[in-house]
Image (spheres, rainbow, N blue to C red):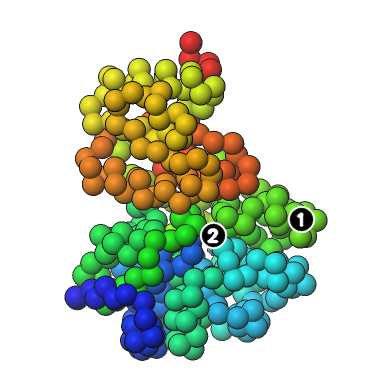
Amino acid sequence: MRTRLLKGSTRSVFDAAALIRAGQVVAFPTETVYGLGANALDADAVARIFSAKERPADNPLIVHIAAVEEAFPLCHWTPDAQTLAQAFWPGPLTMLLKKKSIIPPITTAGLQTVAVRMPSHPLALALIKASGCPIAAPSANRSSRPSPTTAMHVLEDMSGRIPMILDGGPSSVGVESTVLDMSGDTPTIFRPGAVTCEQITMVLGECCVSDSVLRPVPATQNAPSPGMRHKHYAPKARMTLVKGDANRVAQYIASRYDRDENAAILAFEEHVPLYGARHTQSLGKDAMDAAHRLFYLLRGMDLGGITRIYAETLPENGLGLAVMNRMARAAGFDVVNADNEY
Ligand code: TXA
Ligand code: MG
């Protein structure tokens, strides 16, 4: 199959919507990362997403809508869901709610909850409206690869596997949406994102973060969300995160780097000079920059033949929690504290 890469326009959205209505899969931009979309209510179309992505069948998809009312036929909507939708939609918040029977089991991997989100990217909204159906879409990477934040990333992973990619420029957020479980007693974050626990607490008065966000799910335990169990965001290189006082972190990383071949360093802008002439990529000034750049940098390191990555860390609050969650998973939870190493 030839994959067409088209700039977002009225015409290309029209063509993409025709493919979606015909049960095909189309990649499209959202403000978080690119998605791989198909009609969420058509089991055969959704099956095509799983095969293009080589995604395990036990990992459910997010259903994207273009207006709040479109959630009502899909799930058991609640007053808290309405409050959060008013505060954060369209935007990077996904809510897990009890599903209704219109959603085929394949979309939710057999679970009784469905993930719903209204993205804010104008091309995503235009595509959903033009298709006239809710669009199931995981991130448009091959399973276990870093999520795509540009149309070129999608082409790298999906060329020959899908008929069309809509190009809407680089994703503005750069990490996937916050996944918030609304089906239990206390709203619980299963995957942190740009809508933070602090913001949700301000609106609802409560919110907690699942333990599994920064720690691997023990083999003996059920994962609250199947995605927590799967290998994710992984670059080809082995990656280690180094915490602690900035100077100690730099000393530790520099000494390890010098022993490795094809190593690279991910550091915050102000620390880059501490690494001298070593191959160092800047995560930027803050969590927002790091979220925006992380997947882009990891993919670049893969292409550059890097086999060992050392990365600085950041505080695990606000958007920092989302960045740390992606970095910890990319590193297979290999985290060292430089303050304890001397
Ligand atoms: O920003 C995003 O959320 C992007 C864009 C395209 O919208 N999508 C995305 O989808 O990241 P995906 O499939 O890569 O990640 C969805 C996550 C997975 O970890 C999945 O396990 C979890 O959400 N999830 C989906 N439905 C669920 C459910 N019913 N119960 C628990 N976890 C669920
Ligand atoms: Mg994904």
Residue extending farthest left: 2
Estimate the spatial distance between the alpha carbons at disc 2 and disc 1, rounded to whole Å. Answer: 18 Å
Quadrant in which the N terminus is drawn:
bottom left
In the image, 57: left or right of 83?
Answer: left
Residue closest to the eye, 49 or 297: 297
State the image coordinates of residue 177 (x, y, percent, origin top left): 54, 60
**SS under mark 2:** loop
Q: Is residue 100 above or below residue 267?
A: below
Residue extending farthest top: 342
Mark nearer the N terminus (2 vs 1): 2
**SS under mark 1:** helix
The disc at residue 177 is 2
Q: Quadrant of residue 38?
A: bottom left
In the image, 108: left or right of 43?
Answer: right
Mark 1 residue type: Met
Residue closest to the eye, 254 or 330: 254
Q: Is mark 2 within 8 Å of ligand 1?
A: yes
**Residue at 55 percent of width and 78 percent of height:** 65
Q: Is mark 1 within 8 Å of ligand 1?
A: no
